[in-house]
Amino acid sequence: MTATETTHDGTIVVEDLSFRYPGSDETVLSGANLKIEPGEFVAVVGGNGSGKTTLCKSFNGIIPHFYEGSIEGQVTVAGLDVRTSSVSELSRHVGYVFQEFDNQLVNPTVFEEVAFAPLNYGQADYRERAHRTLAMLDLDGLEDRFVWELSGGQKHLVALAAALSLDPEILIVDEPAAQLDPSNARETYDHLARLNGAQGKTVVTIEHQTEYIAEYCDHVVLVEDGAISWKLPVDEALNRLDDLRAQDVHPPQVTRLAERVFDDDGELPVTLRDGIDQFADRISETEDRSDGAVAKTATVDRRSEPVISFADVSHTYQTLRSGTRTVLDSVSLDLYPDERVVLLGRNGAGKSTLLQLITGLETPDTGIVTVDGLDTESVLPEQLATEVVYVHQDPEEMFIDDAVRADVAHYLEDRNYPDVDSRVDDVIEFLELTELQDRDGRLLSVGQQRRASLAVGLATDPSIILLDEPTGSLDLASREEVGRTIDRAGKRVETVVIATHDLELAAAWATRVVILDDGNVIADGPPGRVFSESTVLKRANLRPPQVVRLAEALGLEPAPLTVTAFADRLGVDDPSPAPITEGNR
Amino acid sequence: MSVLDKLREATSVDAIKTDLLRTAYENEGSFLHRLDPRVLLLWYGIFLFIPWLFYDTEVLLGLLAFVSILAVLSRVSLFLVGVMAFSVASTLVSYAIVTAFTGDPVAAVRALIPFTLKLTIISVSSLAVFSSMGPKTLARGLRSLGLPRQFTFLITYGYRMLPVLFEEYHDLVNSYRLRSAPPDSPGRFRWRHYLYLLKLSMRAFYPMIFNVAKRSRVTVEAMETRGFSHSLNDAASTELQLADLQVRPVDIGFVGGSLAVVAVIAVVL
């Protein structure tokens, strides 16, 4: 190409960058300064709305070329001035994987998607490039598959492959772990680590989950109110607990545990391995004190009638190129009143299908689903909806009116309930939505959308509540908020079933954990027992929360499930009351 | 009864979805798919014109039979055929109803049959041609005929959005169902129930468009980061994209053969 090619290394320099969206007085970025050296693996952290995505979108020119805001300062990426270079010019050097990677896939098949960029740049070897990139990410064999028939993990890797096909020096990935199951997220990170290590690419990820940061990244950048607070090596960065918490970023569980347990001012461990080393001494010291406090067992009365019952239920669906997929294969499962059930399983394991079978929106191909004594095939989903509420994993799908208040009232008004207004007021107040009640739900931030979608669900006053991925893509504050809501809602309803990848939520909240894999229930029981079955977890692409793994490595039996429980076992007094999302603290 | 009905309902939504997607994308095995898209478009142009040359019902029926065979060979969606049959039949019925007031409905419908047949021939050939061309082939065909890439990409992207729209729509209709009150009694032939579903499915349109439009922002950004606008002025890129288009004997044979069939039908009938 050009003679200046040699100067294109993976350096990113941000000097005094400020940016304001048009029509807004608030600056998203104000005076940000940052330098990222070639070959670094950097995590950008910060709360929802801190400006981290805006910052990263300035690296490939989407800011300012696609948002006509006012920009000041200078961004130089791979030797190019962002303000004077076009997005397509910059994109040869910067690959970008969006957070909503589903919307990034613009071609019908995997091969076309990956070949799209090289073809657009007129590279005659586009076929080889596409195949090479697919092979690099272990995606060979998927070339002719339709993108909408892929699993979430595969889609994300295809989006990554599409960004890599131009062989850019810099790769930016926005929240890879947010929508993937833990093992898919790790797979993505493993690939990123290889690209960073073997090919020397600069990798920048935006990430909420510090456990991945500790394991994979070498530097952390903290964004606060549109400015860069600091950029530090990862060990040092994750020890700045107060800075992180102030920005709603929660440190890894080992670090949080060490903070409670160790009283000296030494550096806290940030990875599981460091944790094992440091806690090993501590455990032997306190061995006689840890009297093996048994985790409290579920006190559900199994003699009562189940509220929800699956008898030998199978469910399949058709695809164009992937054949008939069996989602559930002869599943039998009984859920009882007052249970708090968490459904776990990899992306596509059938969790959502199982929830939709309970609503009656889907009916089994064979077998019987009974809800409150009614065969779901014999009644309309509308009738079941008086007892069951389903909160969709994508909160947008819950908004069918043009204001949050109207959405919350929809069910009550349609069914001519008396005193609609006061009941809606109750729910709105209960979930602290008063400020937002007149806004269109679809235009709220993700955290607010989750809260509003829960309000829509709770307004129906259900006895069974089904939540699909309620904590996906949320930062610490929003997750805690959702956690509190679930807890408070749980007092009003009989049975709550949550499908999630969030094992910390499962550990801290559930009385019963059900793991689905390959269309079958492969584990079912209280979290303490299920999380100790490591082979089962592995089979379902799951990893127990970090404290559980730490406890296992240290030989603590039974393993404590949360940071608080662990600290208690080590005889540390807990000064603060534990909310249900205590596992996140 | 409701078990059967619900089964039908559930299978039909999914069945229609799969059927339409198959029409849009799975055309590789069909006969017309093997032809060069430009030739196919030329053939289509000819068949838009040919029916207007004839007035004889028998000849028109012959032409209809010919294009129907091609449609069967290109595995046209049964759903689309159903929709077309419905619209043809309902047009004729509406003629009959209107003319019942003004005179002899039978004569009127009979007089309109040739005209309706011509439109049907054109519809069936459209179905045959467009279901045998995948979005990519169609876009390349139009592109090589000089249409700008912005337009042809819109076609492929529109096709790409089909499954997204289906998903979104299905989810929203479900959201409506879970929050609405069904009619107290379904009525004779459950007409109230179906009217209720029809209302919901109409109301779900606005949120669907809104949600999809909101997502397209990311799509536009993503296309730009992959050099879409660069490709518009890049000769090498255009050349690569149109590289394997070529007119072969089978293409010429197809157009020639079709014209011969038309001639035979015109002469014999």
Image (cartoon, coloured by chain):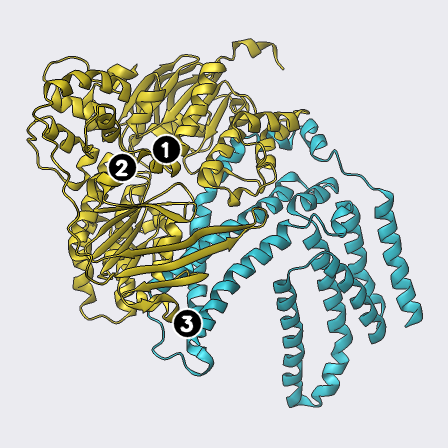
Q: Which residue is mark 2?
A: A531
Residue depicted at x 42% and y 61%: A364
As helix, strand or loop, the secondary structure at mark 3 comes to: helix
Type of the residue with mark 2? Phe
Q: Colour of chain B?
A: cyan
Type of the residue with mark 1? Ala
Instruction: Pick whichever, A494 or B203, lies toward us.
Output: A494
As helix, strand or loop, the secondary structure at mark 2 comes to: loop
Q: Residues within 10 Å of mark 1 (few under 14, many from 20)?
A: many
Type of the residue with mark 3? Tyr
Percent x, y of residue A33:
33, 17
- Location of the C terminus of chain A by quadrant is top left
Q: Which residue is mark 1?
A: A177
- Location of the N terminus of chain A by quadrant is top right
Residue A465: which numbered mark, if any?
Answer: none
Instruction: Pick whichever, A6 or B67, lies toward us.
Output: B67
- Give the spatial CA distance, label 3 vs label 1: 41 Å
Residue depicted at x 85% and y 57%: B258
Q: Colour of chain A?
A: yellow
Q: Which residue is mark 3?
A: B196
Instruction: Pick whichever, A145 or A167, lies toward us.
Output: A145
- Give the spatial CA distance, label 3 vs label 2: 47 Å
